[in-house]
């Protein structure tokens, strides 16, 4: 992820919030946080959810991309959050939390089983006794990338400076590895400027996730298949484990 221009290049980061305004995932996490007094948001990005969680809580937001954290710090309420530039595979803060989050499909930037397991170890290492975790990853069985072609993904985003900006994606899946490479494009009609980033993400199925979490000492209490709270089913787009440390 740290080499992905979509997150590290300020010219591309400026578009991130235009397309990630939050929705059911944010609403679910805010309610799920409940009485948690300490929260660790791994892969916090530009900090929208992180700052929303911060009133009356001690919240730490971690991301490996300085450009994302620069946006996060400037958010209203950003001064209430401890921002840390760090990698979820190796992070060790020396303290524990009532709730650890890894949302926005950030788990998928870890492309190998070793890196995925390292991220799960980090979650386990930061959970307080009785603490809970939640993260999300796309269900590979749903093959979401089939809808990420230029025709299907064409959209318009409203930029505060450029006005209406055209956006689209393109994607290809390596069936041997399960890694999807996708391109993100932005075009400013008023000036003709174009911005482009190429990203890679991995898709892990529920069985593989369950085995890795067990190895990391994480116990899953519930498997969801959507941010509306539906139980996991093979035909749903999301895999959302919720649990605690064993």
Image: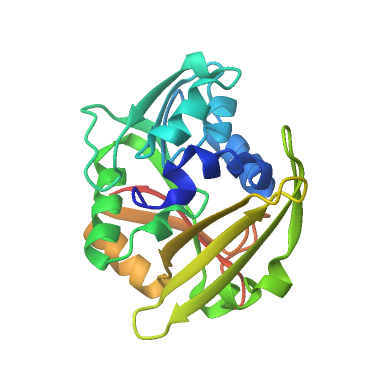
Colour theme: rainbow
53 shown above or below 138: above
Is residue 113 or residue 214 the one in the foreground? 113
**Which quadrant of the figure has residue 212?**
bottom left
Residue at position x 26%, y 45% in the image? 122
Residue at position x 62%, y 47% in the image? 25
Q: With 95 as the anchor, is 233 left or right in this view?
A: right
Where residue 163 sits: x, y (%)?
A: 78, 40
Instruction: Kindly give the residue lying farthest to the bottom in the view shown.
Output: 176
Where residue 57 sits: x, y (%)?
A: 49, 19
Residue at position x 39%, y 25% in the image? 83
**Which quadrant of the figure has residue 184?**
bottom right
Where residue 130 sits: x, y (%)?
A: 36, 36
Whether residue 36 is visible: no
Is residue 186 or residue 124 the one in the foreground? 186
Residue at position x 72%, y 46% in the image? 191
22 shown above or below 240: above
Whether residue 201 is visible: yes
Instruction: Kindly give the residue lying farthest to the front in the view shown.
Output: 191
Where residue 106 sits: x, y (%)?
A: 44, 52
């Amino acid at each position: 992820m740290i080499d992905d221009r979509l997150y590290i290049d300020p010219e591309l980061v400026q578009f991130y919030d235009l397309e990630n305004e939050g929705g059911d995932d944010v609403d679910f996490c805010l309610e799920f946080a409940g009485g948690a007094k300490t929260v660790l948001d791994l892969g916090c990005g530009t900090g929208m959810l992180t700052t929303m969680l911060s009133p009356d809580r001690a919240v730490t937001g971690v991301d490996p991309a300085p450009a994302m954290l620069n946006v996060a710090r400037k958010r209203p309420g950003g001064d209430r959050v401890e921002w840390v530039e760090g990698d979820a595979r190796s992070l060790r803060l020396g303290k524990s939390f009532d709730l650890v989050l890894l949302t926005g499909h950030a788990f998928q930037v870890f492309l190998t089983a070793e890196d995925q397991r390292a991220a799960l170890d980090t979650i386990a290492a930061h959970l307080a006794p009785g603490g809970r975790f939640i993260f999300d990853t796309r269900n590979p069985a749903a093959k979401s990338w089939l809808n990420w072609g230029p025709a299907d993904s064409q959209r318009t985003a409203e930029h505060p400076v450029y006005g209406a900006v055209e956006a689209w994606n393109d994607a290809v899946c390596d069936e041997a590895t399960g890694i999807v490479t996708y391109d993100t494009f932005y075009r400013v009609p008023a000036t003709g400027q174009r911005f482009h980033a190429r990203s890679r993400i991995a898709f892990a199925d529920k069985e593989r996730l369950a085995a890795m979490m067990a190895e990391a000492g994480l116990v899953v209490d519930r498997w969801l298949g959507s941010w509306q709270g539906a139980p996991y089913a093979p035909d749903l787009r999301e895999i959302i484990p919720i649990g605690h440390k064993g």
